[in-house]
Each structure stands twice: as structure tokens, then as C-alpha cells.
Image (tube, rainbow, N blue to C red):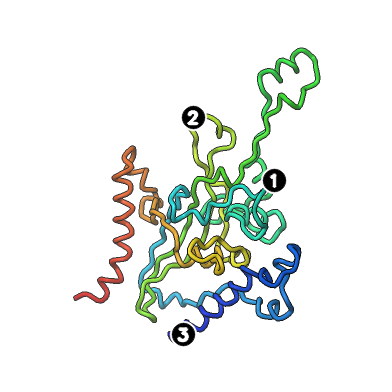
Amino acid sequence: MTIKSFLLTVSCVFAVSVITAQANILNAKSPDQIGVKTEEQMLLDNDKPLEYGYVDDRDILYSKMAWEKIVLDERVNFPLYYPVDTNNIGSNRRSLFDVLMKNIKNGNIKNMYDDSYFTAKRTAKDLEATMKLVDTTDLGFEQINSGEALSEEYINRRELTSADIVEYRIKGLWYFDKRHGELKYRLLGIAPVAPDVNFIDSEQQDLVELFWVFFPDARDVLHEAKSFNNKNSAIPVSFDHLLNARRFNGYTYKEENVYGDRSVDEYISDNALMQLLESDRIKDKIRNFEQDMWSY
């Protein structure tokens, strides 16, 4: 693809994004007309995610699988986290977690997995057990022991929402394409991470991966959903573009290695600073490969 054709493609994507973001808002005569597209707009709004080019295995000179954490309390990662309260906001703005859960429930995302190796599938019933807690209080047990029917007020119900998501974990492949002579990245999987729902209100909270999604399988869904663009609300950015363009801050917590893909905290424990430095070392080691290709 030449530079000219690439720029033309990007321009077309942004043009369609404008239409999607502010459909009929300036021409609406009543609030119910906002978001209703004209026939011309619907003809233009037929874009799809930018297809990945075919990469022959023989063209991969070097590759390294890496796992990263995207911590959501960092400002640059806020577009993935907010909004958490959707009661007073339009239906076109949802967090990444809400987008994933909505499309899992309606069947647009059919496959979920236990881990990042995509070996064992999970069902919607499995997710319900992971994300919901129904518990009886001590007063409820006293009521049951006394022979009375359990009152609803003595039942604690807790369900994980987008506000409970602490981070995302992603899996991707860095590879050097010798045909193009450059280092590239391909995102393969993503998982929301939250405290264990059974201990979510306790002082010590263990983080768990709720499920893994094979990213290429969810690209159509993530392309339709738009994240908030803080610099220009007329041009929202799709979650597919945001993640593929790596418009987030993450740090590497694991790379494939001879020790069974052990994570950084397994060989550097109880030292957050050294773990962060090790993450940077892994990133530099991967990125330096491309630089070393052209250094003598």
C-alpha cells in the first residue's frame, strides 16, 4: 500500500466517523431526530475494520509474544474505562467493558475463553457465576435457623459492573516483517480484570481475569463502538482503532520464555520498582531488534 492510498483510506474512515458521531444533530427539529441518519448517510456508513494484511510465516524473521497490563486509573487509559454511570448519558457512549458484555449477551461475541492461550471456552453461565454474588447475612441465617422464611432484606446481591474493572490484560505478537523491513504488532487477545466478586468488599482483594476474547473475533463489534475523543468530540475513535493503534499505556508483565512463560512477578517478587524496570527491559529488548537490523 502506497502512502497516498493509506492517507486516503484514513481520511475516509475519519469522514465516516464524523457522520457517525454527530448524525443529524444540527438538522434535528426535535430530540428524537438526533442520531437518525439520512439515506445518503446510511449509504456512506458501510465501513468495516481495516483488514489485516496476510502475513506469510516465511516473512516473519523474528517474533516475540508478550502480555501487557493496561491499568485504568492512568489518565491516558480513561477512554477504556469511562463512562461507568450510564443513567444520564447517551446510548452511543459506553465503556469497553459494557460493549463487551452487551455483545456477549446478544450473541455477537460467541467465544470466550478461560485463559490467554484460548484452549478452554467459557459459557454465559460460567460468566454469571464469576460476576455475580448472592450471599445470606448472619441475620438471615438466624432467621432460617429459627424456622422462618428468609427475608429478601437479608440477602446480599452483588454484580460486577464497569466501575469495578481495574485493568485490562492484552496478549499480542511483536514480529519483524522482512518483506516490509519493519517491526510490527498484532493484538491477539484481551481480558477485563476485576476483584474477585466473592471478596470484593474485603480489605484484601485478589484480581481475576473474568474472561478472554480472541481480538480478531471481536473487531467488528469494537469497530462499531466508539470511545470518547477528548480532543475532538466530532471525531470519536473506535475501540478497534484505539487498541490497534496502541493509544494506551501498558506495561509488560509476561513474555514467552523457556520457563513456561513465567510472569515477571514470579522471579521478581515484592518489588514494584524492579518489576517496572524489568517490563521496560523486555520492551527495549523487542524494540532494539529492529534498530539492530540497520546498525553495523
> With 233 as the anchor, is 258 left or right in this view?
left
The label nearer to you, 1 versus 2, is: 2
Q: Quadrant of the C terminus?
A: bottom left
Q: As displayed, is residue 270 above or below residue 50? A: above
Q: Amino acid at mark 2?
A: Glu
Please give the residue where the numbered disc 1 appears in the rendered image. Answer: 125
Residue 8 locus on image (x, y percent) = 51, 84
Q: Label 3 to label 2, Cα distance in Å?
A: 54 Å
Q: Label 1 to label 2, Cα distance in Å?
A: 28 Å
Q: Nearer the viewer, residue 210 or 21?
A: 21
Q: Residue at x 45, y 53 (%)?
A: 70
Mark nearer the N terminus (1 vs 3): 3
Asked whether the viewer can see residue 35, the reply is: yes
Q: Nearer the viewer, residue 70 or 89?
A: 89
Mark carried by residue 1: 3
Q: Residues within 10 Å of mark 2 (few under 14, many from 20)?
A: few
Mark carried by residue 208: none
Please give the residue where the numbered disc 2 appears in the rendered image. Answer: 203
Where on the picture, by quarter, is residue 218? bottom right
